[in-house]
Amino acid sequence: MSIRFEQVSKSFGSKRVLDGVSFEVERGEILFILGRSGMGKSVTLKQMIGLLKPDSGHIYVDHQDVTQLDENQLARVRQKCGMVFQHPALLDSLTVYENIAFGLKTVQFIRSAGGALPEEEIKRRVIEKLALVHLGPEILDRLPSELSYGMQKRVSLARTLAPNPSYLLFDEPTTGLDPITTNAVNDLIHDLSRKLQVTSLVVSHDMACALKIADRILVLDHGKILAHTSNELLKLSQEPLIQDFLSETLALLPPEERFDSLAGVRQ
């Protein structure tokens, strides 16, 4: 297993957002983490890379318990993990090239790479990662403010890919996007995960997208796991929250697509 949570609990004040949560993520899998707002989805990702520490339990990344690591040791785990946040979070004063190259010039990356990369290699990687998100070198000298929001999201993803992470963590990656761009980003998540053979965890509210591209879906509610299963088996769940998610997704589909896309869901 590449990622394993064992009896993980986390509270903020009197609110317990995770209550003895245990699950595993297979290497190369695309796992969607669904649930209502405030149910611990983003907290789960942040604990995996040590941005938050659980109150109890253990989290393993490549058989290494991240809950027992200090900051220097966590930095090496974070090198394996590329985090894509809700918003692009590009540095406004830097060009597209400088934003994507930023992670390749950090002290930690230089140490793990055995020394600084030549500028030619950095440029090659930047252009390569841009191509993976379907953008070209003509935007390298532009500032983030000169790009559409959807393009900024793609540049942010290219920046995440630049250090060649083994894990991609997406925290609500389609927030604020129109339906066409949302579909394009979702397709990118699937294609990149398969092409680069990485393990992807996607926090989302988008059941339709999860049913389209996820290998498995994990549903959180009130600190507990309601389901952790394949897309097809999830459609058979009798949990009211899951049925609500599925019914809402069904209502958004054109009539001719409803049966094929969500076969097995009560209508």
Image (cartoon, rainbow, N blue to C red):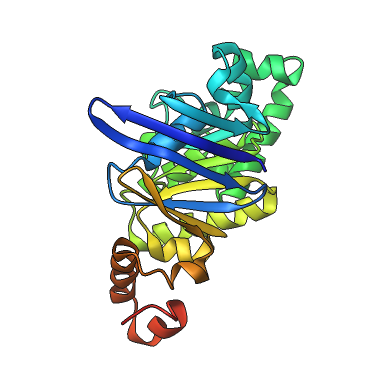
Q: Is residue 81 visible?
A: yes
Residue 117, quarter of picture: top right
Task: Please give the name of the residue rendered at 62% of the width and 46% of the height, measured from the top-left corner.
Answer: 199
Task: Please give the name of the residue rendered at 66% of the width and 40% of the height, measured from the top-left corner.
Answer: 2
Place of residue 124 in the rendered image (x, y in percent of width and height, measured from the top left)? 70, 35
Place of residue 112 in the rendered image (x, y in percent of width and height, measured from the top left)? 71, 19
Place of residue 131 in the rendered image (x, y in percent of width and height, measured from the top left)? 62, 48
Q: Is residue 159 visible?
A: no
**As drawn, which residue projects farthest toward the bottom?**
256
**As drawn, which residue projects farthest toward the right?**
114
In which quadrant of the rendered image does the C terminus lie? bottom left
Residue 92, quarter of picture: top left
Task: Please give the name of the residue rendered at 46% of the width and 34% of the height, measured from the top-left corner.
Answer: 8
Q: Nearer the viewer, residue 200 or 56?
A: 56
Query: Left or right: where does residue 19 sit relative to residue 154?
Result: left
Query: Left or right: where does residue 17 sit relative to residue 47?
Result: left
Place of residue 49 in the rendered image (x, y in percent of width and height, measured from the top left)? 52, 28
In which quadrant of the rendered image does the N terminus lie? top right
Query: Left or right: where does residue 103 sit relative to residue 196?
Result: left
Task: Please give the name of the residue rendered at 66% of the width and 50% of the height, measured from the top-left corner.
Answer: 28
